[in-house]
Image: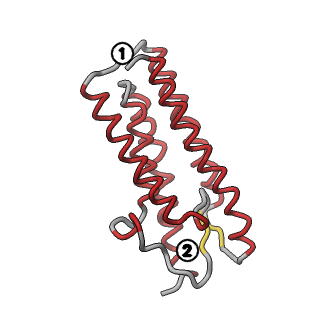
Amino acid sequence: MSVSAYALLVGAWSLLRVAELLLSEVNTGPLLGRGAHEVGAPHHVWLLLMNAAVPMASVAEVALRNLTFPGLLGWVALLVLVLAEILHWWAIATLWRRWTTRVLVLPGERAASAGPYRWLHHPGYVGGVVSAVALPMVHGAVGAALLTVAMFAPVVTVRVRAENSAWARWGAS
């Protein structure tokens, strides 16, 4: 894969993140209007910043280190990226009008149990984080992948705990 093709892949990944953000913005107002409780607002901005940092770090490392496509590792990372994006967007499609980048819980509603939620408690996070780590690995940007893990691990851990707590407090039993 050429550097130009990789840049297009990174651009496509970034557009998917923008699409998520737009869907989130469309859904947030109506959910809040229906009485949804938001938790974890302070770490929401960190999640957004990290999703912007991943493509920048990936492209920067590839360019600055003049990395070449790593062959089999790159193809495996691309396959992982595609599968992770499918999982991530399956989670989003399952929640659709309830899905946001924020942690919002409607009182009395049950947490999702359809789609990928039948097997995973937080498939959106799993798919999103795995995708973010795989993206730099497609072109051998190991430093950017490690940075991604270091950025996402604490924030997603805090978000999952906040979300679980919010569902326990306001969700239907």
Position of residue 105 measured from the top left corner of the image (x, y, whole percent) = 60, 73
Residue, far left = 72
Q: Identify which residue is drawn at 38% across, 24% down.
A: 139
Is 59 rendered above or below residue 108? above
Question: Which residue is tagged 1?
Answer: 68
Q: Is residue 16 left or right of residue 41?
A: left
Q: Which amino acid does label 1 sit on?
A: Thr
Q: Identify which residue is drawn at 61% across, 46% down.
A: 19
Q: Identify which residue is drawn at 52% across, 68% down.
A: 163
Q: Which of 19 and 105 is in front in this view?
A: 19
Is 90 rendered above or below residue 12? below
Marks 2 and 1: which is nearer the front? 1
Q: Residues within 10 Å of mark 1 (few under 14, many from 20)?
A: some
Quadrant hosting residue 81: top left
Q: What element carries label 2?
A: helix
> Which comes before the other along the chain, label 2 or label 1?
1
Quadrant hosting residue 166: bottom right
Position of residue 124 measured from the top left corner of the image (x, y, whole percent) = 46, 57
Position of residue 52 measured from the top left corner of the image (x, y, whole percent) = 58, 37
Q: What residue type is labelled 2?
A: Ala
Position of residue 120 measured from the top left corner of the image (x, y, whole percent) = 36, 65
Q: How crowded is mark 2: few (under 14 residues within 10 Å), some or many (20 or more)?
A: many
Q: Identify which residue is drawn at 45% across, 57% down.
A: 90
Q: Marks 2 and 1, how far apart in space?
A: 45 Å
Q: In which quarter of the image is the N terminus?
A: top left
Q: Do the residues labelled 2 and 1 touch (CB within 8 Å)?
A: no
Residue, far bottom = 173
Residue 166 image label? 2
Residue, far top = 66
